[in-house]
Amino acid sequence: MTQRIRMAVFPVAGLGTRVLPATKTIPKEMLTVVDRPVLQHCVEEAREAGIEHFVFVTGRNKAVIEDHFDMAYELEDTLKRRNKNKELEELMRDLPRAGATSFTRQQAPLGLGHAVWCARDIIGNKPFAVLLPDMITLPGKHGGRCLAQCIEAYEKHDGNVIAVEEVAMKETDKYGVVAIGKDFGHTFEIKGMVEKPAKGTAPSTSIISGRYILKPEIFSILENVGAGAGGEIQLTDGMKKLSESQGFYGVRFDGKTYDTGSKVGFLAANVAFAMSRDDIRPGFLNELKKIIPSL
Ligand code: UTP
């Protein structure tokens, strides 16, 4: 029997340089897609997948994230007095239960591997999920959003799990790439991984896309892994080491993933999420047709 995945880590300490100047004072995770911060979409995905405790690894200038997951007494009181019940209900629905969030600081942005390692004392000795909050997803045919599909794969294989997506071979040098072993269709065995491979050397076109299920042995490895590509402590390097002693499985997420950490990805996410909302689609499509008459 696999141990249930109850906790998820959200590394939110990066600088977001790709979306400057928007992120000069606003953390990129707080930029809005339709009517919620990017990070709230991610928390929803985790909640839908059964996550009960949300661990945020924050950095300087990210205090607003903590406030977002707290009560906003004056606002709630004003909404109540003005009978804005729908708005109030929505606020309360998005709020995690008391005690269901933890915040820790990554004092310097030394890399994703280091950010995940910062959560070690909060997670303890249990398998856990990691969600990169700049990636947001819409459900696929297989059922659920990306993390739900990862948890299903973890329960099936009882190993570490990485969600992947496909890119063109010429794009692979920008990402972590996995080598594919035994193939089960929706999932597969990972037999190698490499962070930002030199052009033409990638072992496949399946890139690591921002959702992971990891066993706690990753923490002691990350403690010693040292800086890798880009001078950063890379999660991929830690996972590669862990794969020498534990199984890793890939999940071909069949829904849509949007990288809100890039300007074009952020805009595409807004269009896709708006079009997925029954209350917004008709009005939004009208406006889009005014901008792009050929639609
Ligand atoms: P990215 O490389 O996409 O984030 O890391 P970044 O560094 O903020 O982006 P750019 O390239 O400067 O625009 C993926 C995730 O890992 C987190 C980021 O916040 C992001 O969610 N991260 C990255 C950390 O928490 N700490 C780090 O040291 C690096």
Image (cartoon, helix red, strand yellow):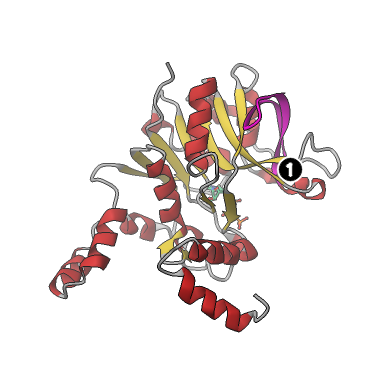
288 left or right of 30 in image? right
User: Residue 292's image quarter?
Assistant: bottom right
Helix, strand or loop at label 1? It is loop
Picture coordinates of residue 255, whole percent (x, y): 57, 47
Kindly identify which residue carries mark 1.
Answer: 196
63 left or right of 129 in image? left
Q: Which residues are magenta?
A: 175-195
Q: Is residue 108 visible?
A: yes
Q: Residue at x 20, y 66 (%)?
A: 76
Local crowd at mark 1 within 10 Å, few (<14), some, or many (≥20)? some
Near-viewer residue (43 or 108): 43
Which residue is situated farthest in the right direction here?
200
Picture coordinates of residue 142, whole percent (x, y): 54, 39
Q: Main secondary structure of the magenta part?
A: strand
Q: Is residue 55 visible?
A: no
Tell me if residue 181 is in the magenta stretch: yes
Near-viewer residue (231 or 239): 239
Instruction: Specify the amino acid type for callout 1.
Output: Lys
48 left or right of 19 in image? left
Q: Is mark 1 within 8 Å of ligand 1?
A: no
Quadrant, the C terminus: bottom right
